[in-house]
Image: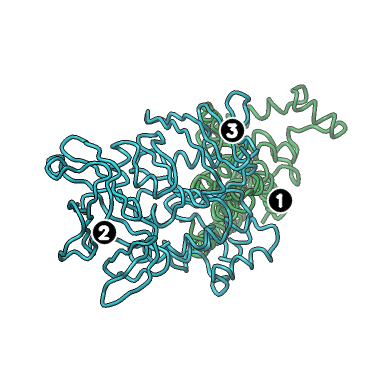
Chain colours: A green, B cyan
Amino acid sequence: MDWQALWLSLRLASLTAAILLIVGTPLAYWLTYSPRPWKFLVEAAVALPLVLPPTVLGFYVLLAIGPRSPVGVLYRTLSGGGLLPFSFQGLLLASILYSLPFTVQPITTAFASVDRKLVEASWCLGVSRLSTFRRVVVPLSVPGIVTAAILSFAHTLGEFGVVLMVGGNIAGTTRTVSISIYDQVQALDYRAANETSLFLLAVSFSVLAVTYALQRRIWAVWPTT
Amino acid sequence: MAHHLTCVCRKRLPSGFTVDANLRIPLEQARVTVLFGPSGSGKTTLLRLLAGLDRPDNGRIQFRDQVWFDSTTRVSLAPQQRRAGFLFQDYALFPHLTVRRNVEFAAPHPGKAGEWLSRFNLTWLSPRLPREISGGEQQRVALARALAAEPALLLLDEPLSALDAATRTRLRHELRRNLVDGDVPSIIVTHDRTEALALGDWIAVLVGGAIRQAGPVEEVFRHPADVQVAESVGVENVIPGEVIARESGLATIRVGAARLESVDTGETGLVFACIRAEEVTLAPGAPSASSARNRLAGRIQSVLLEGPVARVEVDCGFPLVALVTAQSAADLQFRRDEPVSAVIKATSVHLLSR
């Protein structure tokens, strides 16, 4: 089995899920509570990766992070000459965009299902908006937040098209486990491909099983109604 | 100005219904104000405008010296800055926090919360979650939580409506006692006239989005400003008194120098004796024997013709309003200063403890 690729995939998936929680939570909050009439446009943009072919997303990300693009130039200045395409950092950026809806949608749903009156009750008790969010909205949304983290982790673990477009196939840098399986099949090494695939299947199933088990428990402890 | 809550504001709801309220509450006199009106009259909307949860289209809200909202100077304080505690109809307790954590939620320090917990007899429920306690207990927790945050004003939206009928009656007096104990001016929304009488010192009657009348409870009930107010309040005579004896199923109430008798329903101490004006029978001259328990001598203060009925105000040690047919009033020659006797059956006197 390609342990190097597996380790890289796990690292990529964990980092993506972690960064998405930090980025996705305020975005979900804004989508839930903003009175702006045009927020449906943002919702549509966030959901795009769900329907867009990964190659299309990968293609645009590749253009956007190219060395002459504003993002590329900024990154080169900040990192002292680094390039984003075909690097782990570039891959991370693409993964974040690719899994964005898998984080934002469960969290938005969770926030929206928190009874508005609880939030208003907290405000009327003199508790600030931020503090109310932290002490009322987030604790009551834990199941949704856990789901979001697991889904983005699992989704990133299985991505293929975007990786190929943005990261290529550089061992130890951008060769993820799904690319590794593809390589093994191309090389007619079915035994190795089978091993890795089975391992990935087991990991994915366990992660999802744990999520659903956990969710049930959390729901039983904290009913939102 | 310093001891008033003034609210002059308009808000048009998406449904097209407009709340156009003009209210001034003297906070010294009115420890508990009841915002009374039929369903759909805009009571909850007005309460939310006061709390800062909704914004009026225009107008001005001032609490004591602090301007909460003014559309001309573009002042609009957030709910957090107004410090108006809000009790929701279903109490909105935080479901993930224990009773103690709920009360501590906005208390300046945990000791303060502990004080309110023991004052409302909730200490033994401290470790429970809201869904593990009864509706009445939830109400006490919500009230303790609001008071522990040291609010400047307390707003209660139908605080008893989530309870079953028996609990509601039991908790009415407890709620008033707790509110008066809490020593924070309160505004309670209700559409129930018994609740209005049992809870309020002051009442503002809201009909169709507008305040039609406001004043001390007894006064508004005795002198409704117009037909709609009269219809919604429904009881003309609300007489403050004290139960001085309870014997063989009858209670005796002292009202100044006069005495009233009613069926004993368990009330003691200070009460309101409520009598509908059409339940009062008037006869000219001094009282004579009859099966009715209450026969009071008095003098006619005024006779007001309202179509086929006459509204007669009698002074029998306390003011009493009677509704008789215009025909009877003419036949019996009811005129100002004429002596009359008012006859009221004990079953027509309804007591509400204070």
Pointer 1 and pointer 3: residues touching (CB < 8 Å)?
no
User: Where is A80 relative to B94, above or below?
Assistant: above
| Residue located 62% across and 26% down the image | B74
Q: In the rendered structure, which amino acid carries the disc numbered 2?
A: Leu
* Residue ID for mark 1: A11
Percent position (x, y) of residue B84? 58, 47
Residue sitting nearer the eye, B346 or B282 = B282
> Which secondary structure lies at badge 3?
strand
Q: Helix or strand or loop: what does disc 2 sit on? A: strand
User: Which sits in the foreground, B226 or A55?
Assistant: B226
Q: Amino acid at mark 3?
A: Phe
To the question of a shared chain for discs 2 and 3, the answer is: yes
Vertical position of residue B314 compared to residue B227: above or below: below
Please give the name of the residue rendered at 53% of the width and 52% of the height, measured from the top-left corner.
Answer: B31
The residue that label 3 is drawn on is B69
Chain that bears disc 2 = B
Q: Farthest residue toward the bottom?
A: B248
Q: CA gap, disc 2 to disc 3?
A: 51 Å
Return the mark for residue B296: 2
Q: Residue B33 placed where, x, y %?
A: 47, 48
Q: Amino acid at mark 1?
A: Arg
Work out how far the residue at label 1 is from the one at label 3, CA to CA, in angstroms.
53 Å
Residue A209 visible in image: no
Say if residue B37 shows up in the picture: yes
Q: Secondary structure at mark 1?
A: helix
Q: How many other residues sit within 10 Å of disc 3, few (<14), some (14-19) or many (≥20)? A: many
